[in-house]
Every structure is written in structure tokens, then in C-alpha cells.
Amino acid sequence: QVSQVKAEALGRLKGAQGQKSVGAKNKMLLDKKKSRLDKKMTRLKKEMGEVKGEESARRKRSEARRVS
């Protein structure tokens, strides 16, 4: 009976260790994905700023042509 209890406990322990490793792997994948998305967001924000700057410069040139 003691060996049966021990075997059950070891089985539960292995199951818990398996779940923990799966959780750790999933967390690692999500962290990678998050950092990749953060980089993409930064790049796109920078690109949007450049587009707005170009648009502003275009408007200024257009206004300058109208005035002269």
C-alpha cells in the first residue's frame, strides 16, 4: 500500500513537472512574440511620424507656391 501511494505521488509529481515545463515554454514563446510585436510597433510609429513629417512639408511647399 505504501508503494502504491508513493507511485501515485510520483505520477502526480511527473504530471505537475510536465505542466510546469509546458507553461514555461508557452511563456517563453509569448515573451518572444511580445518583443517582436513591440519592435514592429516602434518601427511603425517611427514610419507614421516620417509620413506625417513628409505630409507637413508637402503642405508647406504647396502653400508657398500658392502665395508666390
Image (tube, grey):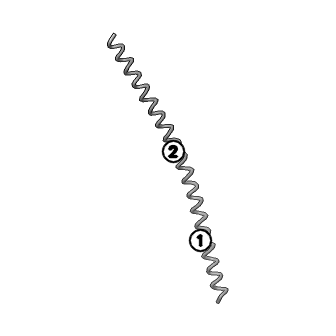
- Of the image marks 2 and 1, the number of the one nearer the N terminus: 1
Q: Residue furthest top?
A: 68
The kind of residue tagged 2 is: Asp
Is residue 31 positioned above or below 10 on the image?
Answer: above
Q: Residue furthest right?
A: 3
Q: Residue at x 61, y 64 (%)?
A: 21
Q: Position of residue 2 (x, y in %)?
A: 65, 88
Helix, strand or loop at label 1? It is: helix
Q: Residue at x 43, y 25 (%)?
A: 54
Q: Which mark is residue 63?
A: none
Q: Position of residue 37 (x, y in %)?
A: 51, 45
The kind of residue tagged 1 is: Ala
- Write down the residue under mark 2: 38
Q: Which mark is residue 16?
A: 1
* Quarter placement of the N terminus: bottom right
Helix, strand or loop at label 2? It is: helix
